[in-house]
Image: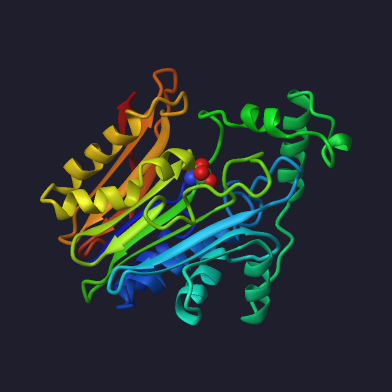
Amino acid sequence: MLNLVAGDWKGTGVALAWAALRAGQAALDAIEQGIRAVESNPDDCSVGLGGLPNLVGEVELDGAVMDGRTRAAGAVGNLRGYAHPVSIARAIMEKLPHVMLVGAGAARFADEIGAERAELLTEDSYRQWQAWLGKNGVDAANLGHMPLARAAWAAMDPQHAGGTTVYLAQDAAGNIAAATSTSGCAWKYPGRLGDTPVVGAGLYADNRYGAAACTGIGELAIRTSLARSTVLYMKMGMSVEEAVHEAMDDMASLPDWRAGGLTLYAIDAAGGHCTVGAYKDDRDDSPRYHVAAGDQSQPVERDVTRLDV
Ligand code: ASP
């Protein structure tokens, strides 16, 4: 059954991905198109063009894809200067005997496949970075040589704007796929990878059971193998709702002050879905997600189910 769940906070690519699924395209093709649209949107400050930079002002992108038919996966991390990490991740999956490339090697491969280059730091993201440095008393002139560890802790505010773009889909042939793309936590330590390019943590897809993906504090998803755990709980007989809640309980049990900053999205192989976000009490907004299933003509936007931690 056709199914699409997207954590795409501006909804940039959802209509495109859903139209592609309705036109009979494969799940992976549809979600790649959706995410490419988000990566090109400068108004989405947590992914692609306009994504917020790391502590020293460089935009570092992470992305991944997983094909639930074969459990083949591709991932790219710490990628600078290219417009579409999701497509580079897919090319890694399809053209290399590897799953993940990072940094200089990823850029080399991106050139090798003729991937589109882009200046990702926009005026607005530059201004936000400068404002953050000013507010936290960091002198931009010293960034080249000063220790950054303290500033990296200051940047890990769970309430801080973040948000990976995640797409999960099942196509007319019953195939399931997952894809992710992000500029990561704003003001991160240079070279930091979150969960987004880590298969098993940030995303997982298996045609037999379903797929899952995460947004939020990636360190928490890595430490709990969150996406893979969710699919494994489904394999062990849980419904998609039970599996998501079980996995979120694992995450919330981490003795970590950030344990209230993560959203988990999942679909099952029968067309169901569940999304749950964990929040500290003082946060009153709920993130939204987009969903479409069966013969629905357009995706609809809904509140993520809130889990207070
Ligand atoms: N999960 C992403 C990361 O940790 C960021 C986010 O979704 O806010 O890099």
Most foreground residue, 299 or 70 = 70
Residue at image coords 76%, 39%: 127
Query: Furthest-top residue in view?
Result: 282
Answer with left or right where residue 119 lies relative to residue 74: right
Q: Quadrant of the C terminus?
A: top left
Most foreground residue, 67 or 163 = 67
Q: Is residue 163 visible?
A: no
Image quadrant of residue 177? bottom left
31 shown above or below 285:
below
Query: Furthest-left residue in view?
Result: 237
Residue at image coords 24%, 53%: 231
What percent of the width, then of the height, locates residue 92?
A: 51, 74
Most foreground residue, 165 or 107 = 107
Answer with left or right where residue 138 lies relative to residue 188: right
| Number of marks | 0
How was the colour assigned to the protein in this rendering?
rainbow
57 shown above or below 158:
below
What percent of the width, then of the height, locates residue 102?
A: 60, 62
Residue at image coords 58%, 31%: 156
Answer with left or right where residue 260 lies relative to residue 142: left
Q: Is residue 231 visible?
A: yes
Answer with left or right where residue 113 lies relative to residue 213: right
142 shown above or below 171:
above
What percent of the width, then of the height, locates residue 271?
A: 18, 59
What percent of the width, then of the height, locates residue 26?
A: 33, 76
Q: Quadrant of the N terminus?
A: bottom left
